[in-house]
Amino acid sequence: MGIEQYLELINTTKCIITKQQRGLICKQILKRGKNCNVLVFGVGNDSIIWNTVNQGYTLFIEHDIKWANAIKQKVDGIQICHHEYLTTCDPKLPIHQQPPVDEKALISHSMPQQLREKKWDVILVDGPTGFDDTCPGRTLPIYWSSLLSHADCDIFIDDYSRPIEFIYTNRFLFHKYQKYRLFEERWKMLWLKAENYN
Ligand SMILES: C[S@@+](CC[C@H](N)C(=O)[O-])C[C@H]1O[C@@H](n2cnc3c(N)ncnc32)[C@H](O)[C@@H]1O
């Protein structure tokens, strides 16, 4: 695929993540060439972009098996690891009323083995759903990202301004990074920048 086809895919795919965000995530992926390992929490209509643009290995983690199967029909060769989170969240509670972070509880949830098998270059936390108290929320993806991250890993946390994403990112990830960028659209996306790629 040439650069024009990439641009068309990035610009024409109908999804929630903005064009600017899609472009910047793709730039980070393309910079790394054929050996890039990309980990994406949450499958969406944008999954085709990350899966196509990355010339290396891309793994998606998805809790909704029906939705994962629907996307598998649409995106050739997509690798989706089904994972049922046993967590709950209540994003309607403001930050100061959220239950305290319980690291022991987080440790008690085992991480899918596939996540440990690669050194990830780009991680996108865009799932599971976390819009109400029926959703698993992103406590574990953020916590696991902190265990898997390293200085040369770019991490994108979507919906960073929601209470759970905000609390867990600040507790487990933010302090590890010197450089970041905050996108102001919707619930905000936070980009924690890899040291030697930015
Ligand atoms: C927050 S969405 C990701 C949205 C994506 N970044 C986009 O721009 O379209 C991720 C989660 O929402 C759920 N989801 C997203 N789109 C869906 C759909 N059309 N139908 C059912 N579930 C969906 C999935 O379970 C997934 O884990």
Image (cartoon, rainbow, N blue to C red):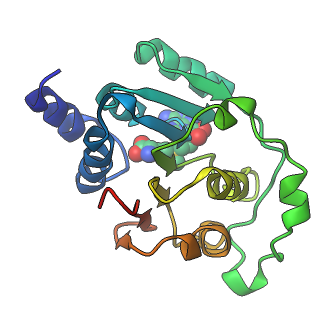
> Front-most of 5 and 32?
32
Say above or below: 92 vs 152: below
Q: Name the residue furthest bottom.
A: 96
Quarter of the picture holding the C terminus: bottom left
Residue at the image position 25 percent from the left and 46 percent from the top: 27
Q: Position of residue 170 (x, y in %)?
A: 61, 75
Quarter of the picture holding the N terminus: top left
Quadrant in the rendering for residue 91: bottom right
Residue at the image position 67 percent from the left and 74 percent from the top: 171
Q: Name the residue furthest left.
A: 4
Q: Position of residue 15 (x, y in %)?
A: 35, 42
> Front-most of 197 and 180?
197
Left or right, residue 106 beside residue 187? right
Say above or below: 156 vs 128: below
Q: Position of residue 187 (x, y in %)?
A: 46, 67
Say above or below: 168 vs 29: below
Residue at the image position 46 percent from the left and 53 percent from the top: 153
Left or right, residue 63 beside residue 44? right
Number of numbered discs? 0
Quadrant in the rendering for residue 54: top left
Q: Position of residue 29 (x, y in %)?
A: 33, 41
Left or right, residue 84 beside residue 43? right
Residue at the image position 47 percent from the left and 29 percent from the top: 58
